[in-house]
Image (cartoon, rainbow, N blue to C red):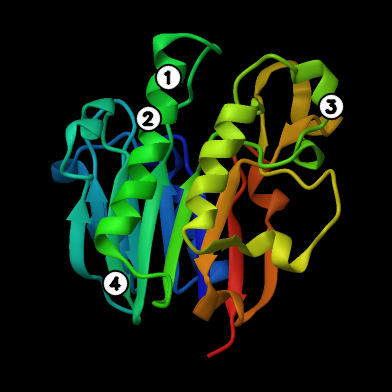
C-alpha cells in the first residue's frame, strides 16, 4: 500500500500536475493540502477518471485539504468539530483500505510570539486531543500533511539562518512531539537518517536550485503501520518544471 502527501498549493492551478503524478506514482491514497477550492468546486470527476474516490474539506480561496483514494473512503470527518476549526479547513479524515487516514494542513504561525503563532500551537494541541477522542494507537492510523514544522535541525538547510523564525522553535517541535507521543512515528525517518532531505523550498531567490529547503511534509504512522514501512521517497522531480508547487510529494510504501 502506497500512501502519499502533497501540499499542491492550489488544486485549480496544479490539477494537470497532480493528474500526471497520480498516473506515474500510483499511490493508493494521496493526502492533499492547500487545495484552495470549495467542496462544491472540487475536481472530483477528473480524479475519478483515474480511479480515485475523493473527499475534501475546502472553503475556497484559502487552505483546504483532501484525500484521493483508490481503496475506498469511508467514515469521513471534516474538521475537529471544535473551535479550532475557526482557523480554516485544515483537517479531513477517512478510512481507506482499513487505514484511518488524516490529511492535515497545520497553520503557518507567521511570526514567533504573534497571535498566529499561539494559534498554531493551539491547533497542534487540538490535533493531539482529536486523536485521543477518535483513534487508538493500536489501530492502523496515518496523520499526513504539511505540518509547517521541521522536526529536527537536520531537516533545515541552515538552522542558524532560520533561528528565531517559525517552523523550527522548541514549542512547535514540542507540540509535534506530543502528537508523536500519542503513538505515531515519522515514517520517513524510520527508513532514512540523512540530513539535507527536504520537501519544501521557497519560491524566492532560487532556493530549490540552491538546495535551501525544509522537511515539513510528514507521514506519521501508528505502530501497526510502522512495522510495515519498507520504502519512502520525497519526489523532487515533481518540484521541477513549469509552475510547480513549492512542495514535493512524499510517499511511503507499506507491506501488505
Give the foreground label among 1 and 3.
1
Callout 2 environment at 10 Å: few (<14), some (14 to 19), or many (20+)? some
Residue 158 circle label: 3
Residue at 59% from the left image edge and 40% from the top image edge: 247
- Residue 240's spot in the image, x, y percent? 69, 42
Residue at 36% from the left image edge and 33% from the top image edge: 123
Q: Quadrant of residue 86?
A: top left
Q: Earlier in the sequence, mark 2 or mark 4?
A: 4
Give me the C-alpha separation between circle 2 and circle 3: 27 Å
Q: Earlier in the sequence, mark 1 or mark 3?
A: 1
Give me the C-alpha separation between circle 1 and circle 3: 24 Å
Q: Which residue is mark 4?
A: 95
Q: Are marks 2 and 1 in contact (CB under 8 Å)?
A: yes
- The residue nearer to you, when weighing 204 against 223, is 223
- Depicted 217 relative to depicted 98: above or below: above
Query: Under tag 1, what secondary structure?
Result: helix
Amino acid at each position: 500500500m502506497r500512501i502519499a502527501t502533497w501540499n499542491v498549493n492550489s488544486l485549480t492551478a496544479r490539477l494537470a500536475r497532480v493528474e500526471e503524478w497520480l498516473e506515474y506514482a500510483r499511490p493508493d491514497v494521496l493526502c492533499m493540502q492547500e487545495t484552495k477550492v470549495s467542496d462544491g468546486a472540487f475536481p472530483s470527476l477528473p480524479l475519478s477518471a483515474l480511479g480515485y474516490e475523493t473527499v475534501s474539506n475546502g472553503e475556497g480561496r484559502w487552505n483546504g485539504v483532501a484525500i484521493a483514494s483508490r481503496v475506498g473512503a469511508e467514515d469521513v470527518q471534516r474538521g475537529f468539530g471544535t473551535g479550532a476549526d475557526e482557523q480554516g479547513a485544515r483537517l479531513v479524515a477517512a478510512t481507506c483500505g482499513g487505514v484511518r487516514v488524516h490529511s492535515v494542513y497545520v497553520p503557518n504561525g507567521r511570526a514567533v510570539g504573534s497571535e498566529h503563532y499561539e494559534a498554531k500551537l493551539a491547533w497542534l494541541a487540538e490535533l493531539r486531543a482529536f486523536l485521543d477522542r477518535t483513534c487508538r494507537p493500536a489501530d492502523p492510523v496515518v496523520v499526513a500533511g504539511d505540518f509547517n514544522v521541521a522536526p529536527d535541525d537536520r531537516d533545515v538547510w541552515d538552522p542558524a539562518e532560520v533561528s528565531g523564525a517559525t517552523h523550527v522553535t522548541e514549542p512547535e517541535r514540542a507540540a509535534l512531539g506530543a502528537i508523536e507521543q500519542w503513538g505515531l512515528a515519522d515514517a520517513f525517518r524510520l527508513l532514512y537518517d540523512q540530513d539535507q532531505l527536504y520537501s519544501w523550498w521557497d519560491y524566492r531567490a532560487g532556493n530549490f536550485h540552491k538546495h535551501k529547503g525544509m522537511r515539513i511534509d510528514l507521514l506519521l504512522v501508528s505502530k501497526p503501520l510502522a512495522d510495515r514501512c519498507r520504502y519512502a521517497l520525497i519526489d523532487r522531480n515533481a518540484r521541477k518544471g513549469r509552475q510547480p508547487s513549492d512542495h514535493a510529494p512524499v510517499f511511503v510504501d507499506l507491506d501488505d
